[in-house]
Amino acid sequence: MPLTAADRHRRTRRDHAGETAEDYAEAVAVILDQHGVCRLVDLAERFGVSHVTANRVVARLEREGLIDTAPYQPIELTPAGRRLARAAQRRHQTVLDFLRALGVSERTANIDAEGIEHHVSPETLRAFAAFAESHGQV
Amino acid sequence: MPLTAADRHRRTRRDHAGETAEDYAEAVAVILDQHGVCRLVDLAERFGVSHVTANRVVARLEREGLIDTAPYQPIELTPAGRRLARAAQRRHQTVLDFLRALGVSERTANIDAEGIEHHVSPETLRAFAAFAESHGQV
DNA sequence: CCGGAAGTGTAGCCTATGCTACAAATGTGT
DNA sequence: ACACATTTGTAGCATAGGCTACACTTCCGG
Ligand SMILES: [Mn+2]
Ligand SMILES: [Mn+2]
Ligand SMILES: [Mn+2]
Ligand SMILES: [Mn+2]
């Protein structure tokens, strides 16, 4: 089948649909790792949004089986959430390492990786990893 | 200033806010180039959305001064729209060439470039262009 | 010239995310 | 124990972008 522009754009929209879940799962994992507990305010601060926005996202991810919470209680990840967080963290790290290996400045690499990561398919991720592997400065 | 996670995510959200404008401007330019005129249905088909969705996007971009239209008439670009289209096309092409130069398959490169392009800052774009320049197969 | 196809517009619905303002719960320190 | 700061929840608003169903305009061919 030929690849149409519509196919490309549908895929990009699909990437965006899963983006919040990936970033939030990753964030919860990071915060748990650093602080032991993850509170709503931690997420709000990390994403630069109001606690209301963070609250609604958490509620959605709970519906989707990624997050485990009770009212006024800290936030935890379900097994599915942990798997997603792991995958997101690894992919994020690979994209970041790749941009650094390409010679992009630390600041820019950090910024761009946050958006790029969600659009990198497995094949491209492998190419990124291979390049970082062979060109990365220790 | 240290770069916080909130800064990264705010930047990604900003990228997404401008994404539709960039892709639609690019699409109008491409369609005008290929068909002479750009109709709403052409945009709907290109993006894989209903004509209603395309209609609303066009209305917004007209409010924003990028598109020129009259009811039931073909769609044109304002000077600002043409400038945006040009920039978007060039950046898209650079990202695509870069992925190909990296060894990513044609199909995957085409898909991933559609999302990645909007998160590539000027510095990273320069790095992409330099790599494609030196590693591209003719 | 006129009837139907194609294109466009509009009403009304949905979800996802953003916000402020205000209310309620939690928990901490004295 | 209880006041106060912190945290969380909720009400209500906005925009962007998806959709279907239905109405209207344009345009073209016979
Ligand atoms: Mn991200
Ligand atoms: Mn994106
Ligand atoms: Mn594009
Ligand atoms: Mn795009």
Image (tube, coloured by chain):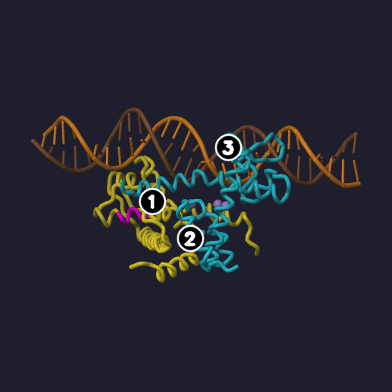
Chain colours: A yellow, B cyan, C brown, D orange
Task: Tell me residue A47's x, y (percent).
Answer: 36, 46
Tell me where the magenta segment starts and ends, as one range: A25-30
Label at residue A120: 2
Amino acid type of disc 3?
Answer: Arg
Q: The numbered mark 2 sits on a residue in which chain?
A: A
Q: Give neighbour class at mark 1: few <14, some 14-19, many 20+ (Cα, 10 Å).
A: some
Which residue appears at 31% of the width and 48% of the height?
B2
Label at residue B60: 3
* Badge 2 vs badge 1, beta-carbon distance below 8 Å: no
* Label 1, ligand 1: CB separation under 8 Å: no
Q: Give neighbour class at mark 3: few <14, some 14-19, many 20+ (Cα, 10 Å).
A: some
What secondary structure characterizes most of the magenta part? helix
Q: Is residue D16 left or right of B8 when viewed as pictured? A: right
Amino acid type of disc 1?
Answer: Glu
Q: Do circles 2 and 1 both sit on a common chain?
A: yes
Q: The numbered mark 1 sits on a residue in which chain?
A: A
Label at residue A43: none
* In the image, residue A119 lies in the stretch drawn in magenta: no
Q: Is residue A1 left or right of A11 when viewed as pictured? A: right
Q: Give neighbour class at mark 2: few <14, some 14-19, many 20+ (Cα, 10 Å).
A: many
Q: Do circles 2 and 3 both sit on a common chain?
A: no
* Badge 3 vs badge 1, beta-carbon distance below 8 Å: no
On screen, A40 above or below B113? Answer: above
| Residue, disc 1 | A62
